[in-house]
Amino acid sequence: MSNYFDALSVLILFSSFILMANKRIKSYIKTFRIQSLLIALAAGIMGIKGSFEEGRIDILVVCLLIVVLKVIFIPNLLNKTYANIEYKVEKDFILNIPILILMCCALVVFTYFSLSTIDGINAGIINTQVVNSVSVILIGLLFMISRKKAIGQIVGFLVIENGLYITALFSTHGMPFIVDVGIFIDVITAVMILGFMVFRINEKFESIDIDKLNNLRG
Amino acid sequence: MRNIVYIVVQILVIMLVSPLVNGIIRKVKAFSQKRKGAPLLQMYFDLFKLFKKNSVVSDVSSWAFKVTPYIFFSTALAAALLVPVSTIVTPQEIPGDIIMLVSVLALGRFFMMIAALDTASTFGGMGSSREAMISSLIEPSILVSLFTVGLICQSTSMQQMMEAMKGTGIPLFHPVYIMVFLALFTIILAETSRIPVDDPATHLELTMVHEAMLLEYSGRHLALMELGAAIKQLVFITVLVNLIFPHDQLIAITGISAVVLSLFLYLMKVIFISIAIAFAEVFTVKFRFFSIPNLAALSFILSFLGFLQYFVLGGSNV
Amino acid sequence: MKIFSASALFQTSILLYLLAAIAALVFIKQQKWDNIISNIICIIAAIFGIAASLMKILVEDMPINISIFHSTIPFISVELRIDHLSAFFVLSLSLLVVCVSLYSIGYISHYIGKRKVGLFNFLYSAFILSMFLVMTSGNAVFFLLTWEAMSLLSYFLVVFESEHEENQAAGTLYIIMTHVGTAFLMVGFMMMYSYTQSFDMFGSSADIPILAKNAMFIMFLIGFGTKAGVIPFHIWLPCAHPAAPSNVSALMSGIMIKTAIYGMLRFIFTYLGVQSTWWGALIIVLGIFSSTLGVSYAFVMANIKKLLAYSSIENIGIIFIGLGIGFIAQAQGHLTVSALAIIASLFHSFNHTLFKGSLFLGAGSIQYATHTKNMEELGGLIKKMPLTALFVLGGALSAASIVPFNGFIGEWLTYQSLFANIVPGQAALNILSILSVAVLAMTGAMAAASFVKLFGISFLGLPRSEQALQAKEVPCVMNIGTGILVTLCLFIGLFPLPILKVVDKVVLNLMGTSLIGQLQGGLLIAYYPLQISGNVISPLLFFVVLVAVILFALLVIRIIGGKYSERKYGTWDCGFEALNSRMQYSAAGFSNPIEIVFKILFRPSRKLKVEGKLAYHPESIEYTTVWESIFEKHLYNPIFYVIKMLSRRTKFIIQTGSIHSYLLYIFVVVLVLMMYNTFV
């Protein structure tokens, strides 16, 4: 069983690498959708396992929530925002893509070394899944740093959230239901506000280039 | 005796199947475009016809131009001897390992690039220069991914790796193998000039890489180059199926029925991979030339992550 | 003393080199004879050297001590001590010298009447002798003296064609860098003396505390690294090697930078002993940087000799990776892996001597025939200089580490040692090893691309200039020199075992582990890293298969297609009908994709100058690319700046020009010394 989770965690990690390699805003959304689908799959497998072994169905409910929210609702919302703005492709990066990808790779290695010094994660043996999912968080952060357009920031934020969620999932094998739901409500609110804000920024400044926010300094 | 059987089976299968792979890929692509497409065996007809035609040779060119088709073809075929297609595995009698495999193919590529420069044509130089870039970028991921599987099987020789896999069950859903599979698949697309990297179907100077190098060839020389390229493609596919989908119960069992069965399985796997390649070609567009480093970086990361999962993060045993 | 002992042969060889140097001065008036005589004496000396070193390695086991001059002045005594390691390096030196001297007989002849040939030959023989003595010196002071002599003599050779300003600049840079390196070595040797009270480099280093050993390791690494041209201490190498006459470049690139490898093995590996794993890791990191950066710079060069010089940096990187693995495995106690890695690096350094020697000689032939080193002015030489073309092709294949040439075997052994060094559980080292694998792979592919460029642009296609059109094949002796080296490359590639046995013997003597049982005889070379059989390659068998397949293909095609007939026709020119040499790909165009991909390394700034009134039919277009040399800009320039500032300060504060203050300084120093004597 842990083989499947290992593989899924690697695939989720890899999807964030693909996200890093994307240039088009449309592909950001697509990749995010795939990543969420993979997470839903992990949650689903864990939920089925949980319902058979312990009779709890809350993880299955969470899985359903993920599918509804992160696979369907949020990407659609982002697509709608995307349709309203004129920038479709990220052109100028702070660093070019191969270097960003190699940096992500270094992040994975770094995560491994930093986690290997923490005791108590699975009693001495380093949990591959946890390393992979913590790396997803860091890559999400790097993604936010490297992208200049506001929609990239939203996707980066969502990836960080995804990373947090799977870290929790893989290390605890199912959090209390109320925590999960709380997080989801947070995310929805955040995305809706952010999406709305992007739209307004675009209207106001005729651009969603966040470099322009420098002008706010006065 | 076993050696001779091995060599004969190997050469026959590789030479006969390799044009078929191209046929399948073209057919699937044609279906996706709602065309009927050329017959599956079209490449055999083409080769046969090309062998009979006489050659036009550029008056600028030197002996390097005429020697290259033979060297390219023979390196491809020699590389094919290193990757077993059936159950007959002969340890140590066919000496050569994955590093040698890469180097042998590099010899063929070296001469192909030289021949492209030999005719003083702009197209040749362009193809050669682009091939230089693509090969330099893709080479690390080839060796890292092969090394990763090699380290798990504790040998760099293809036959030994297959022997080590015997009876381990098909490790389809293991993180390392998933990563290596994806990496090798990307490598196949890049090394055999498939669509995201190169377009085998056009002669447009903006896009072509492999075709640009062959532009001056005609007649039997062209046939040899085409066949060599097809063999090289099949070699990579064979590496992929041998490492990722080994017919593990049949490895190193002799006997006619086992050999025939394994050959049948091999053929099925090759057809499966060819269809997968065709789908990859249908669903992706050709990358801008300077986006290829992104692809190369991704394929390197795939192989490196595979390595990390096993040798650093200490994933579960295979 | 027996006449046919290795010791006698070594001494004869040294005396002959001396004789060659003297002969060069004696016959200084008859330039033609001077050249022939001194080179022939060098060849004979080198043949003695080959015989002596082979005899030493294969027959005699005890180190040879030769005390030439033992003075009463402390530390200054001329004593030689030759063990297997020294003999091995002398072997590569002598092999190279035979070929290079043969080549020089022809090559130097174009200096006759124009330059001081006698002086050149004196410097040349003395340079060889100094390298010989570096490899055989018996104590640290004598080592340093010969090391310094080697640097100075090579400096004079670098600036031999001193009328070009860039040669002088290259020489100045070279002599500054090499002295910085020597300074670090001197600090290391002083530390050695202060702890052990002796300069005996064959003695024990047990008295040196571990901290001091670490410091000495750093000193030696920087000192020898500078000579080896390892990045970031490389900046002199791509300037100095192209500036020297080609036969000297062959010696410098082929063997002089290997004296650094010798020094590292002698002083760090044997004398200090490997103390911790980070030593090896540091060496690998240097190796990784050198090989990737070296090969990327090599690829974009349009100057043939610069390309070769950067390729030397790359190969030194590969040797360093091997050395690093050897050091790590030694520190961890894996003696077999360590032995394998050291064998790999020694073998690769031997191979590099052969192929880089042949390539520099080939570049010299091109320069001899066309008077240019710039690829953009060459082209089509394969028809004018068929033999040179063949030899350069062979050397190029070997340098690109392509089977069945010798470069491949060295790289294969390095791969195998990396393979054996990866075991689950040691995270950081595994990552370093797999990165080395990736780097070796990329280096191999890019080296192949660089040599495709070198061969393709300068020998194939249409001639790009009048000189290239008028080129003629070089004299026979030159081709013999190059040819021997290339033949050796192919021969060792096909039959690596004899040389591997020699290297194994050296390693057995060096660290007491032999792998000869695992390096099988016969047609194969085999190595079993993890007690599992299988990692076998046989280049010879591959070669046979290659030939067989070619014959088979010829036969089959003959049956299917009948007799071969061809039609000569112009290259496809898109109907333009006036294909000329300017339409083919240029060297700059060939390397442009890589240059763009690795923008971050080169920081190219491009200038396009278009002249003419019509927008689409300009009269001339000039395209220049300037690369920013990141190491000089971000590492060396700040250092130079600080030094310059300090010197200026010194000038104003201390060196005031007034004789009184100088006398005051002396007075103060004397007083301080006397006070020291009184109170301490």
Image: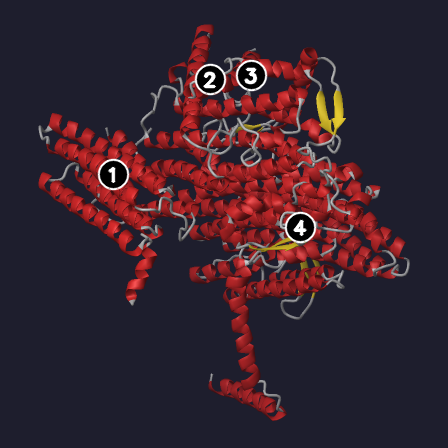
Are the residues tagged 3 and 2 within 8 Å (C-beta)? no
Q: Give the CA separation, mark 1 to mark 4.
A: 52 Å
Residue underneath mark 4: C618
Does mark 4 fall on the same chain as mark 3? no
Mark pair 3, 1: CA separation: 45 Å
Q: Nearer the viewer, mark 3 or mark 1?
A: 1
**Residue at point 69% right, 47% down?**
C375
Residue at the far top in the pictured view: B257
Name the mark nearer the viewer: 1 or 4.
4
Residue under label 1? A75
Question: In terms of depth relative to the viewer, which is nearer, C69 or C243?
Answer: C243
Same chain for the residues at labels 3 and 2, yes or no?
yes
Q: Judge if badges 1 and 2 mark residues of a common chain.
A: no
Q: Relative to C613, is C417 on the left or the right? A: left
Question: Dot 4 falls on which chain?
Answer: C
Q: Where is residue C329 in the image (x, y as percent from the top left)?
A: 46, 44
